[in-house]
Image (tube, rainbow, N blue to C red):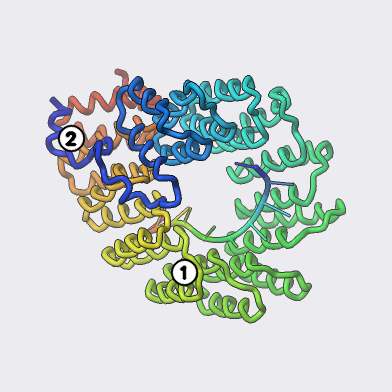
Amino acid sequence: MLTGLLRRNYSHLRLHPPKHSNFTTTTATATQPLEATTIVTLVLNSSNPQTLAQSLHSSTIQWTPQLVNAVLKHLWNHGPKALHFFNLLSHHPSYTHHASSFDHAIDISARLRDYRTLWALVSRMRSRRLGPSPKTFAIIAERYAAAGKAHRAVKVFMSMHEYGCFQDLSSFNTILDVLCKSKRVEMAYNLFKALRGRFKADCVSYNIIVNGWCLIKRTPKALEVLKEMVERGLTPNLTTYNIMLKGYFRAGQINEAWDFFLEMKKRNCEIDVVTYTSVIHGLGVAGEIKRARKVFDQMVKQGVLPSVPTYNALIQVLCKKDSVDNALLVFEEMVKMGYVPNSTTYNLVIRGLCHAGEMQRALAFMGRMKDDECEINVQTYNILIRYFCDSGEIEKGLDLFQEMGTGGCLPNLDTYNILIGAMFVRKKSDDLLVAGKLLVEMVDRGFLPRKITFNRVLDGLLLTGNQGFAKEILRLQSRCGRLPSKIKL
DNA sequence: TTAGGGTTAG
């Protein structure tokens, strides 16, 4: 009965795209082969594994690793379906998976925290002599670290040789970088000190560690490592200096950053576009728009051409600290100069417009992305959905959400969190039902909601008299291992 | 996938 009620009131919130959706008109990835999006629709709509297998095994589809990888990429935000697709295709009579597709499938299982499937895939890969490669281990280590299992990441690295994959300096550097990027810098530094002799740590290894300390805003530590590097006879390069410069800005040490920049110039460092981009961004974030502009003009005079990221940096800080209209002037200027704005550029402008309350102009830019064949990504949708919801136009947010379901861009964890959060503002009982339905759907797609999300939805459903649905959610919460400690089923 | 520059909000 409950599902009937939901279907009646919220049919606009489709769980799956309709059979004959306007898939190709809403997808922005025009560079992908058309077939990939067609196959994605097929996989998303099918409920019968046998019929799906038949379709996938039919001789009309010319499978290539590129096509398989494109489909997996599209299904990235629906992990269970992605793995289902990968498995069905594993039984194809003549096609066999490429190593890169195995890497994708391993990446997806890791993100679902389905470690059993992950290691089963690694075994299959090995028995078919397709790997695992250092890249496979980089993926696995990164996912373990991102899931808060940094020790497992290190263990995986240490056991690589048991899978016929020998550790060398580059895989050592990879694990250091993985740990640093997940903010486990202390652990990375200890591993580095323990093994730097064995692997003959190079300039790259030191740069990774220096960057690690900078990422957690501990610039004195970064300087210490930099000194150590020199003492051991390694020469810092431009990358080292760019890391340090960015680190000062990130830590809010604007004067130190500026002095460091001047020092780099004085010492005739071959300052590059990355250096200038960091300075422009750093000054802008600190509110020093005029100085940022000056540096931008200066770089052109020095013969260093701005890049798309340079324009992005300037556009972002203008949106934040100046005005979106000035940012738009820069946007049009870059286009006139022959630069091709990327998704980030558009997203920055769209966010700027949303922030200024110009929702219609923001939507117009989304249309311009389509015209320019620029990929509309999940961030683009998330920005617009968030601001529509924040400004009380929840229906428009839901419309965009629905467009995602039928387009080539599936919602991610952020999308669900934004929308579920928005379902509480109107204090409408029906909204809570939608929140519950979104919660069910996100779990179905392999996302793990936070405990607080479950609790809020549960409270809401109980308060609005939806005891039945609340019970269903509670069971779901239990299955996800997110049960509050006090409650027993 | 061996290192550095745009995506995040209040």
Q: Residue A80: x and y, percent?
A: 41, 29
Q: Position of residue A449 (x, y in %)?
A: 37, 35
Query: Mark 2, chain letter?
Result: A
Q: Secondary structure at mark 1?
A: helix
Q: Is residue A399 above or below residue A260?
A: above
> Extreme top residue here?
A489
Name the residue type under label 2: Leu
Report the front residue among A72 and A309.
A72
Q: Position of residue A96 (x, y in %)?
A: 54, 26
Which residue is drawn at the image coordinates 43% and 45% (left, top)? Answer: A33
Disc assigned to residue A409:
none
Distance, label 2 to label 1, CA atoms, is 45 Å
Task: Report whether A28 appears left or right of A198.
Answer: left
The reply to the same-chain question for discs 2 and 1 is yes
- Location of residue A123 in the rendering, given as x and y in whole percent from the top left corner: 60, 21
Q: Quadrant of residue A325?
A: bottom left
Q: Is residue A343 visible?
A: yes
Number of numbered discs overlaid on the protein picture:
2
Report which quarter residue A435 is drawn in: top left
Q: Chain of mark 1?
A: A
Q: Residue furthest front?
A: A59
Residue that appears at 63% across and 59% down: A247
Q: Dot 2: what SS?
A: helix
Residue A463 tag number: 2
Quarter of the picture holding the C terminus of chain A: top left
Three-letter code for the amino acid on which mark 1 is drawn? Ile
Residue A421 appears in the rendering: no
Q: Quadrant of the N terminus of chain A?
A: top left
Q: In this orientation, which residue lies closer to the viewer: A408 or A173? A: A408
Residue at image mark 1: A315
Callout in the foreground (2, 1) = 1
- Label 1: how many Cα within 10 Å (few below 14, some 14–19, many 20+): many
